[in-house]
């Protein structure tokens, strides 16, 4: 039966997993007395968070999907992120789906001109130029800023005059990290910037995962030291 969590200890069973990284990072960021974020567990068979208007769902082979499906409409979420397999068992058609990869390469070296100084407008402009659907600048800053302040996210970039490439640890949970927002300015592509930057910002203490934006990026990330782990799925808008 689904239960509302009241403290971080109730999520301690979550494994090193990309969806658990999101759930755990949100919990560490917002805590459990904030109406803006809520966290639920189904024994130790499933967990979900509602934060930033999005449900993140982690499931196991013992998950009661009928209960999850009946519960989701009451959350008032605008989107859901889970494994492609979970979407199928919930009977939800994903609007986006692609590969999940996990870093298994060697400990990388620091790239030339690396910076961990986050400059919001410059980063937002680079991501927008590279085709990311960022929403408004204010929403971007509000979403990533609180996690950066709480150390549940971190920034990495290559800056040599201008910001040439960027990537984030978007969600740093207790046992795993989810990377993302990887972008290289069009005029600086082909120089190996992203292939040097992304491995460098992985964690040498926690499993590091990444959601590919599309299937065509799988080969690129394999060359960077990642291996195929699974598939993610997302549905924006009305689910039921």
Image (cartoon, grey):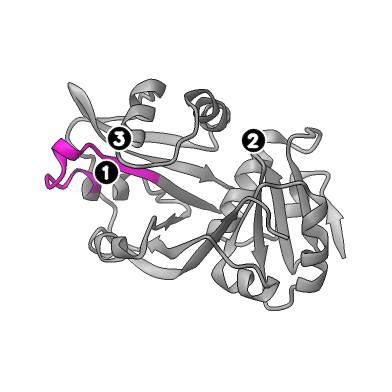
In the image, what residue occupies the spot 27% across and 58% down? 106
Counting from the top left corner in percent of width and height, residue 42 is at 80, 64
Q: Magenta segment range?
A: 181-194
Q: Quarter of the image for the C terminus: give it.
A: bottom right
- What kind of element bears circle 1? helix
Q: Is residue 130 above or below residue 98?
A: above
Label 2 vs label 1: CA separation?
A: 25 Å
Residue visible at 83% across and 44% down? 6
Q: Is residue 64 visible?
A: no
Give the CA separation, mark 3 to mark 2: 29 Å
Provide the residue designation for mark 3. 129
Which residue does the image show at 70% across and 50% down from the upper left?
49
**Residue 165 percent across, percent down from the top left:** 26, 37
Residue highlighted by disc 2: 29
Q: Nearer the observer, disc 1 or disc 3?
A: 3
Task: Provide residue 12's location: percent of width, then percent of height.
Answer: 70, 55
Are there few (<14), some (14-19), or many (20+) residues within 10 Å of tag 1? many
């Amino acid at each position: 039966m689904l239960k509302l969590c009241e403290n971080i200890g109730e999520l301690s069973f979550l494994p090193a997993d990309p969806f658990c990284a999101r759930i755990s990072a949100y919990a560490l960021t917002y805590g459990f007395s904030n109406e803006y974020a809520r966290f639920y567990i189904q024994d130790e068979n499933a967990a979900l968070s509602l934060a930033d208007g999005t449900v993140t769902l982690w499931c196991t082979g013992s998950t009661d999907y009928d209960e999850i499906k009946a519960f989701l409409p009451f959350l008032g979420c605008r989107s859901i992120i889970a494994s492609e397999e979970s979407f199928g068992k919930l009977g939800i058609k994903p609007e986006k789906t692609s590969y999940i990869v996990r870093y298994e390469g060697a400990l990388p070296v620091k790239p030339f001109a690396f910076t961990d100084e986050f400059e919001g407008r410059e980063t937002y402009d680079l991501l927008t130029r590279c085709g990311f659907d960022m929403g408004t600048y204010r929403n971007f800053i509000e979403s990533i800023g609180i996690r950066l302040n709480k150390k549940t996210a971190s920034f990495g970039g290559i800056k040599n005059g201008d910001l040439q490439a960027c990537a984030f640890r978007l969600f740093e949970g207790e046992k795993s990290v989810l990377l993302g927002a990887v972008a290289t300015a069009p005029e600086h592509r082909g120089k190996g910037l992203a292939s040097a930057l992304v491995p460098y910002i992985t964690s040498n203490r926690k499993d590091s995962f990444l959601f590919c934006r599309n299937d065509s990026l799988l080969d690129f990330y394999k060359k960077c030291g990642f291996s195929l782990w699974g598939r993610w799925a997302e549905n924006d808008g009305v689910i039921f």
